[in-house]
Image (tube, rainbow, N blue to C red):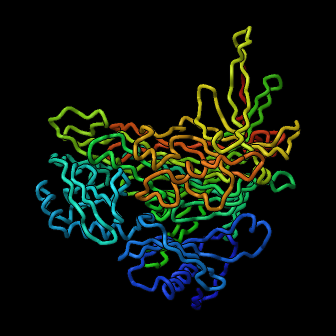
Amino acid sequence: MTHRVQLSETVDTGHPLDPLSADEIIAAVELLRAGPAAAPTFRFVAVVLREPDKHLLRSAEQVARTAECVLIERSSGTAFEAEVDLDAAEVTSWRALPEGTQPAVMLDEFTEAEDNCKKDPRVVAALAERGLVDLDLVCIEPWSAGYYGVDPEGRRLLRCLVFARLEPDDNPYAHPAENLVIVYDQNAGEVVDVEDHGLIPVPRETGNYLPSYLPPPRTDLKEIRITQPDGPSFMVDGQLVTWANWSFRVGFTPREGLVLHQLRYRDGDRQRSVANRLSLVEMVVPYGDPSAVQYRKNAFDAGEYNIGALANSLSLGCDCLGEIHYFDGVVVDALGTPVTIKNAVCMHEEDDSIAWKHYDFRTDQAEVRRSRRLVISFIATVANYEYGFYWHLYLDGTVELQIKATGILSTTAQSPDAPRSVYGQALNNDGLYAPIHQHIFNVRLDMEIDGPANTVIEVDTVVPDDNPTRSAFHTVERVLETEQAAIRKAAPESHRFWKIVNRSSLNTVDEPVAYRLLPGADSITLAAQPDAWVTRRAGFATQNLWVTPYAPDERFPAGEYPNQSTGGGGLPAYAAGDRSIVDGDLVVWYTFGMHHVVRLEDWPVMPRQHVGFTLQPFGFFDRNPVLDLPIPASAAVDECCHPTSGS
Ligand SMILES: [Cu+2]
């Protein structure tokens, strides 16, 4: 089918990996509105760049700009996928998704749900029973409905929880109306059911963090000023960033937020590829409390809520400090209007202590070099929680993802007279408590160590049986040859890590060049049992490592549409074919996270925790790659680096 509209102005297509501009989104939406999505009942879940296949990108300078779109027709409840060729100005593909497919929750559906719930007399009555009569102070919080064995009969559902404020600025999470769940149909725009699992008094004690509720802030901290009088060391050309020896392209999608494309390291006169694409592709937050309401809290914040679309507009001096470059993120609202998130991605350099040092006590000579890192980050607010995603590039070739969790606990209430639940932490003596839970993240690492032909090797440290000194240990390597063989867990007891190697590119000692994926203390997996619904729906999270052959349509570890999914999609399905992953173009998927046993200190707003992992060159370079760092200016003029006595 062909539908043509005139673009409002000439679109500068830039690089094929640049995210869709607002104009391109407008053009795609107009073409769909002029064609198959003419009915006013269509809603736009996503209008994003269809990233060109990387093989095509390698072979051609110009590839067609294509928008991939997901829509819902609300009266029938049918979801559709469409592709729009923006160069040809035509809708090139339009197909209905299988019945029951529920794309991610749209932001507009949140506000609509809250408004419509408050209009329902059953809701008003249930609130009144709990003493909640001022609806302006009631917060209806829509949670994804998940799937627990009951056919939703085609309904697009939210399960809304209720919190209350005592006054407009009050923190509602101090006052959960536990055991009240409003089941809401987003397509029909109506309440399906009000579940009441028993009256528990709404805790009254407040828990506030706004300055107006707190004593005056402390005054004993002097200002720290980060200045770079000569400006930052990075250069930005559109979405292309070069910094020190690194270069990469910044991408942004509503589902993943920040994406790093074409990550390369300049090594002498070689531009060496490290990764084709890096991003967070899913996260799931399962709660461990089996009570009627809490066990259904298993949000998939990327696949169900589009964590990129929830990105904050960042502000200088608060979220980021120093010489900052910002990138905007463009998303689409339910009616197809582009929405620009100003300053969605922040990039800056940070001092990072020492890069290397040695003091030669024989000559009384010290050499030290400073490390620094480039930080590319965004912060998303998912209702109560904040997540900051910080990619760090280091001068020595190390890549790190650090995820910072802060914000407010998802609270509940227990009767103050009942014995305290073992499934959470009491936050006060008024019945407020927060259940134990996990934040499990998955990253998709499309690695290309010196090119796409890579292999993954598991490295364990073993103590040999033949060990007369009782003190010997060494590493053993095992090639992970197929997808099933590459479904692995971290093993701190054997100091396990995984190498991504290129066996056709050898280093100075004739070993394949490699990066290693270092699982840290955060290499957790799902705590739930194998037959729990959340385990079936988030199968990826039962393992730390998966490796699959590169396939452009294998993008999300819980499947394309995890919202209300019945399970089995994503990585377990991709890996079912047990394809070979030896010397091929492959994708490494890594699961890690935060096992959140709640602390009293997490209330009323949580001090930032962080979890993450590291990708480190491992025989990728022939030597320490940062011998060439500048000598610190002060080393020449003072004795800071020269201790006066040794031992
Ligand atoms: Cu938590």
- Measuring 67% from the left and 71% from the top, which residue is drawn there? 238
Note whether 464 is above or below 322 in the view shown: above
- Along the line of sight, the residue nearer the viewer: 299 or 405: 299
Note whether 647 is above or below 621 in the view shown: above
Q: Quadrant of the C terminus?
A: top right
- Left or right of 329? Residue 17 is right
The image position of residue 5, as x and y in percent, is: 57, 90
The image position of residue 419, as x and y in percent, is: 20, 32
The image position of residue 343, as x and y in percent, is: 53, 66
- Left or right of 524? Residue 467 is right
The image position of residue 478, as x and y in percent, is: 72, 33
- Left or right of 552? Residue 313 is left
Could you say which quadrant of the image residue 72 lies in? bottom left
Could you say which quadrant of the image residue 20 lies in? bottom right
- Along the line of sight, the residue nearer the viewer: 225 or 194: 194
- Measuring 23% from the left and 44% from the top, which residue is drawn there? 413
- Measuring 76% from the left and 31% from the top, which residue is drawn there? 358
Note whether 24 is above or below 380 in the view shown: below
